[in-house]
Image (cartoon, coloured by chain):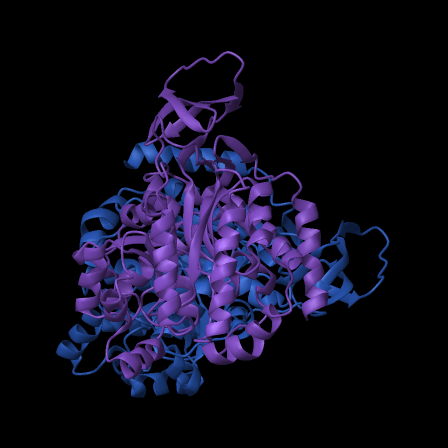
Chain colours: A purple, B blue
Amino acid sequence: MSLLIKNIELNGVCTDVLIQGNRFASIAPELEAEGAEILDATGMAIIPGLVNMHTHASMTLLRSYADDLHLHDWLNNHIWPLEATMTEEDIYHGARLACLEMIKSGTTCFADMYWHFHGVARAVEEMGLRAVLSSVFIDLNDEARAEKERKLAEKLYEESKRYSDRIGFSLGPHAIYTVSEASLKWAKAFARENGLLFHIHLSETEKEVADCLAEHGLRPVQWLEKNGLLDEQTIAAHVVHVNDEEIEILARRGVQVVHNPGSNMKLASGSFPVQKMLQAGVKLSLGTDGASSNNNLCMLEEMKLAALQAKVVHGDPTLLPAKTVFDMATGNGAAALGLDAGEIAEGRLADCVMVNLENPRLVPGYDLISDMVYSADSSCIDTVICNGRVLMRNGRVDGEEEIIAEARKYKNRFQ
Amino acid sequence: MSLLIKNIELNGVCTDVLIQGNRFASIAPELEAEGAEILDATGMAIIPGLVNMHTHASMTLLRSYADDLHLHDWLNNHIWPLEATMTEEDIYHGARLACLEMIKSGTTCFADMYWHFHGVARAVEEMGLRAVLSSVFIDLNDEARAEKERKLAEKLYEESKRYSDRIGFSLGPHAIYTVSEASLKWAKAFARENGLLFHIHLSETEKEVADCLAEHGLRPVQWLEKNGLLDEQTIAAHVVHVNDEEIEILARRGVQVVHNPGSNMKLASGSFPVQKMLQAGVKLSLGTDGASSNNNLCMLEEMKLAALQAKVVHGDPTLLPAKTVFDMATGNGAAALGLDAGEIAEGRLADCVMVNLENPRLVPGYDLISDMVYSADSSCIDTVICNGRVLMRNGRVDGEEEIIAEARKYKNRFQ
């Protein structure tokens, strides 16, 4: 199957883009391709699909269910009790809503952590996105629970192979305060053995750091380093409370650090030390976290939050310029997941977004990257293509009404 | 002319809303009104139109023209040289683009400060919004220039009466560092004499405070207080760098303080002391500032920025909850401008927005206010009504293609 995109703006120049199968085959003006489906893209620009590097997709079902609360009140009294009632079917409906929202805002790939793996995987398979999905692993230092979680992870990894190439499996040890040392080591060993990513929340709150210091005499990153758990296959989300030595460790080990500005701000977790991270050469990407602490999955908004917060926190308006944050949200995320994507270039995976340059928020249009980071919203996204397949055209996703109708039923069920 | 909105959700209840002339005439289920135009609003909710309390609307023409720069480099080397070349016709085209963007994101009213008053007023008149427009007043302590500016303000005030009731005139003394003491006093006296608002930038940067201390031995708010320039008819934008005594003065005088989180963050001006302002009972509303320091005029985004930044700056996730920030963006702004608007209630001015509850970002839909503040973007806005007239329906504004085509021409002219 071939798709020929005609007259699209790429890096400020008008060109054609031919997609064959799931890759960009040719990028040049006035291409022809017999039998290809033609997309007229006059008045549009092409950018790489956005990569959301830390989500709990199905938490869309909890969007605006409990806001403006202290973290522990929010989790213990609102979120966890409700999550405990959710079935795989619920998770499936939440993940479909999440995929729909992500497609509408230009995201083509995400790295998730949640319960009921198959509920999420089935939604992603149907919706056409690319994703690396982890089944959250929590044992609370209980050996029986640990044994059960390990068996489940092994089983789900085997079962995950039934899905298409768009869906990858990763280990999802929740955090150092919810997973035993033995299980963290087991998960990293299993990940290394099978070439899988290891996705963990890290140093999100001051409490996590204080507890780790009290228990181990080390800060979280130091403790993970001592246990040999950090490498390039480690996705560490949040990473707000780290000192200079920890930042140096993260850089040296090539850890994939995910910045989640919206969630860190909304929960008042703290301010990400982006300047030191950049100076140390830490690998940085961007994620929204779940929709109940954000409250959406919009990477366009997340780019703006990242750039604006970096500037005000460090008192430097030149910090985290538009291009840097755009790269975090595209190429860096793709690289972190080991994907041959994140760039519009011949031979790469065809994950891309067509942006409507006639949207008032993108006018006059001096600098598309600045416009995408500082001004765009989802109304600017016209077409989304993942793995060579059109998931949205003219802002419409097939079947969106049914997905929304199913998800709206939770309003009455949960309220 | 009557407009009957059928089956719309208001505060969680389905009802009808009858608009007669420019006001809400009746709000009740199953209304009938002979000869009224009917709007079927099934699946939608009604909220007050958003009020953007500090803009330089025509700076849309400079959107993404110069980003990620230090304030003085940005102003002196990029923004001011370009602004100096702009004609009233340019300002008209920029203001039309601004109005279009504001309508699309649910704003029905704004308080502006810019040059070429008639360029802005003509655009607002045509686009159907409500606005209080100030002509920026800068004399740089030059008596000849001050005389010219005073004459211009008097002339423009007289000329402003030719526009409809939707357009108000206000004094626009730029700031204490660009306007002489004599002119500030003249402007406030003229405003008081004619019942007009006085719109000024105040304590935006640390430099402004340091310079004021050096020159007068007082901080900016103290100095304005000493000169009798603060009252309920004063709109003070930014107000980032103020101490406890200044906050107490602002509260006591009933000054209308406008929080501009996006601009303050992007230019790294500083963090607004929202907690102390709230505790002191300062009147707070919300604004985007101009599109070159934001880079859009979207009050939906601005609400989220305000809430999220307040929480992380003060380390308290309960601070500035959704309802408080929503009120800042609606009723508080309307009250600051002396408008009988900002609420969906019988007898009030019919400035309102119909929100599409089927948008995935508003699903499941537990709490509309939380959803509007934390999740919505302009794609959720279906219909906008100002002064009883429909400005947008189904996300479409009449004539938008022509407005965008004209504004896009500036890309080649200015680049």
For residue A395, above or below residue B277: above
Q: Residue A413 occupies which quadrant of the picture?
A: bottom right
Q: Position of residue B258 (x, y in %)?
A: 41, 70
Q: Position of residue A389 (x, y in %)?
A: 52, 31
Is residue B306 left or right of B177 when viewed as pictured? right
Question: Can residue B151 be seen here?
Answer: no
Q: Residue at x 37, y 78 (%)?
A: B315
Q: Residue B90 occupies which quadrant of the picture?
A: top left
Q: Quadrant of the C terminus of chain B?
A: top left
How many badges with numbers are in the image?
0
Q: Is B112 or B64 nearer to us in this picture?
A: B64
Is residue A8 left or right of B225 when viewed as pictured? right
For residue B394, above or below residue A266: above
Is residue A95 left or right of B320 when viewed as pictured? right
Q: Is A105 or A112 nearer to us in this picture?
A: A112
Question: Can residue B253 be seen here?
Answer: yes
Q: Residue at x 37, y 24 (%)?
A: A14
Task: Give the farthest residue toward the left.
Answer: B214
Q: Is B135 or A168 nearer to us in this picture?
A: A168
Q: Position of residue A229 (x, y in %)?
A: 29, 61
For residue B402, above or below residue B44: above
Is residue A179 left or right of B105 when viewed as pictured? left
Q: Position of residue A271 (x, y in %)?
A: 31, 69
